[in-house]
Image (cartoon, grey):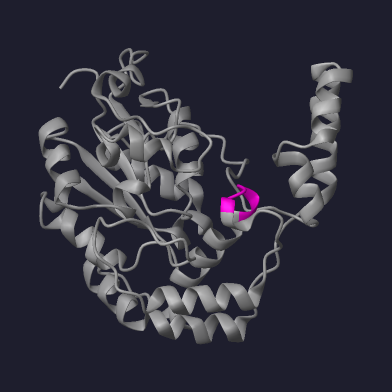
Amino acid sequence: MGGLPNFLVIGAAKTGTTSLHNYLGQHPEIFMSEIKEPGFFVYEGQSDVAQNIHRRYPFVTDLESYRALFRRVRDEKAIGESSPQYLDLVNPELIARLHRYLPDGRFIAIFRQPVDRAYSYYLMTFSSEEPWSRGREPSIDEFVRQLRADCHRSDVLGQGVSRGPHLAGSYADRISLYLDSFDRSRFKLCLHDDFGADSRAFLRDIFEFLEVDANAEIDVSTRHNPNVVMTKGATRILLSRPNPIRFAARKLLPAGLRVRILSSIADFKREVPRRLDPDLRRELSQEFRPEIHRLEDILQRDLSHWLE
């Protein structure tokens, strides 16, 4: 159908999809939607649900608005958008929408070591000010409790996303629903490991899949959407929530100066979060052993290093 993408980056969350979205957008033969994560194929016709989800940009819930994301397309060969929700919340209704709107679409998915991805998601809830995390600091003990509780919960495809760090249960089940519904040739299934090890080679492989110039020059020097956590809860509240100090600054300071001051405070108070202890990471990874083995079969890749 005209005015729609011909490929989607479907996830998973916290596997580098934001960086991939931005790198793909640099390619002269690729058009990427300006808004990342429109989530249309999940939330079509569900504006009331989409509006209640805490996020920076609203989900797109009607076809006209979704088409508008691609109105600037010229002669690009590959037209895409990136919404990890398409893997997190895949269900038969989403699959039916994809068959209806993108009958010839292609799909890109990235998979990451599950404990690393879970920890990254947990930290993201603090850097993005999820409602439940406001005024609190990250805790390794809390992360472990949430992860273990989430691993053992009942997970039904398409019934919502857990607020725990595991995020969405079995990705083997989720990608299998796609593979059972579309021809395998329409999928590029990737590993976050490869993205981190050699991003240029990773991108060349994606470009070949999308049938665009594999040797296009892409600036990969910037890592997009890294996890950063403010060191003090008070600073996080100051910068991200309505409060008297922010109100006074808005009244008394020019906009440009106000932005520079707030940016300086954020830069000073943010830090790269510490890594998980290797022994703890190894212990937690055993919780995912069956899932990892299922992904090995699907991807035809040795993932034994994910358990080390």
- Image spot of residue 286 (x, y percent): 43, 85
* Figure check: 278 above or below 189: below
Q: Is residue 170 left or right of residue 138?
A: left
Q: Quadrant of residue 167?
A: bottom left
Q: Residue at x 30, y 82 (%)?
A: 290
Q: Residue at x 30, y 14 (%)?
A: 75
Q: Quadrant of residue 6?
A: top left
Q: Is residue 50 left or right of residue 95?
A: right
Q: Foreground: 15 or 284?
A: 284
The quadrant of the image that shows the N terminus is: top left
The range drawn in magenta is 126-131
Q: Is residue 45 left or right of residue 11?
A: left
Q: Foreground: 296 or 172?
A: 172
Q: Residue at x 46, y 61 (%)?
A: 163
- Image spot of residue 121 (x, y percent): 52, 59
Q: Quadrant of residue 82?
A: top left
Q: Residue at x 85, y 16 (%)?
A: 254
Residue 143 part of the magenta-drawn span? no
Please indicate, yes or no, whether residue 214 appears anywhere in the rendered image.
no
Please indicate, yes or no, whether residue 250 appears anywhere in the rendered image.
yes
Q: Is residue 23 left or right of residue 254?
A: left
